[in-house]
Amino acid sequence: MGSGTNTGTVPKAAISHEQPVLCSAWKDDGTTVFSGGCDKQVKMWPLSGSQPVTVGMHDAPVKELAWIPETNLLVTGSWDKTLRYWDLRQQNPVHSQQLPERCYALTVKHPLMVASTADKNLIVFNLQNPQTEFKRIPSPLKYQTRCLTAFPDQQGFLVGSIEGRVGVHHLDDSLEGKNFTFKCHREGNDIYSVNSLNFHPTHGTFATAGSDGAFNFWDKDSKQRLKAMSRCSQPIPCSAFNSDGSIYAYAVCYDWSKGAENHNPSTAKTSIYLHFPQESDVKGKPRIASSSRK
């Protein structure tokens, strides 16, 4: 927050899983929250005051989920190596899609969906035909995938890894020359995970957040970093823009990346911060045509 002020927020409601929660998502109308985790359950929590209900199950922890408003389905990705699609009115999944390995990350921008798996594959689906893989792409990054997000125009995606690196990938083979990777979230010889990727909803630029406690704004088209923010004292495990991009929210807490020996319960604190970006922080710079360069 620009002024560094603390607001006296209080949680209005909470639900629990029996084991750690790994993912959550809103329904598009803001009335419902979905969550999944190590208890293998997929829960739906109507915020009208109704009790949460289990709407899906997997055979291993649920790592990712996303609501697809265009089809009124919930998609979940699990370490049981499946994607499952749920109609909330039915007990059983309407479709179960086998993956080559455990699901590590998932992004949906209808009709595009991309799932990353533990074998460093990126499985692309056209949600108009979700029973068939559209394309399988080896990750452009050498190390384990941590996060994914689809381009706003559905023409490609960003992928972030545990090795402080992001890949920019276009689906059209004719645009292969525009694919690139870049390093980020590093300090000296220390390399940190990229934990979160978020596109700005109006400008098409994007933010990265990492285990170094920093978040940065980038423009993929001009291949420039627009703004580097000062680091927090602990890692940033997740982040999101609000609907118009005027607020960037991020969580700050220990992420266990340095093991239990670096976790101090007496000083461990989980905080949620709001950043109000200036337009210059998130608005891309115009590209200079090569013929006009001196």
Image (tube, rainbow, N blue to C red):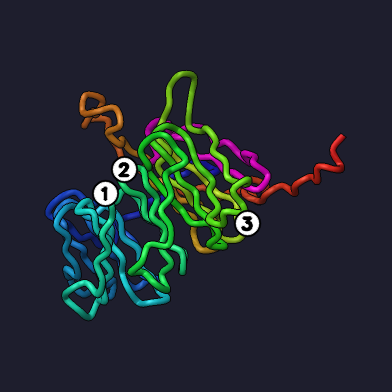
Residue 247 lies, in percent from the top left, at 52, 54
Majority secondary structure of magenta residues:
loop
Who is closer to the viewer here, 57 or 103? 103
Query: For the residue marked with disc 2, what is the amino acid?
Result: Asp
Residue 240 in view in this figure: yes
Task: State yes or no: discs 1 and 2 in contact (Cβ < 8 Å).
Answer: yes
Q: Secondary structure at mark 1?
A: loop
- Front tag of 3 and 1: 1
Residue that numbered label 3 is attached to: 203
| Magenta span contains residue 216 | yes
Query: For the residue marked with disc 1, what is the amino acid?
Result: Glu
Residue 105 lies, in percent from the top left, at 35, 51
For the point 21% across and 75% down, the residue is 50
Query: What is the crowding at mark 2: few (fewer than 14 residues within 10 Å), some, or many (at least 20)?
Result: some
Query: What is the crowding at mark 1: few (fewer than 14 residues within 10 Å), some, or many (at least 20)?
Result: some
If you read the primary sequence from the N terminus, does the residue marked by circle 1 or circle 2 appear first? Answer: 1
For the point 25% across and 76% down, the residue is 88
Query: For the residue marked with disc 3, what is the amino acid?
Result: His
Residue 52 in view in this figure: no
- Outermost residue, top side: 189
Q: Which numbered marker is on residue 101?
A: 1
Q: Secondary structure at mark 3?
A: loop
Residue that numbered label 2 is attached to: 119
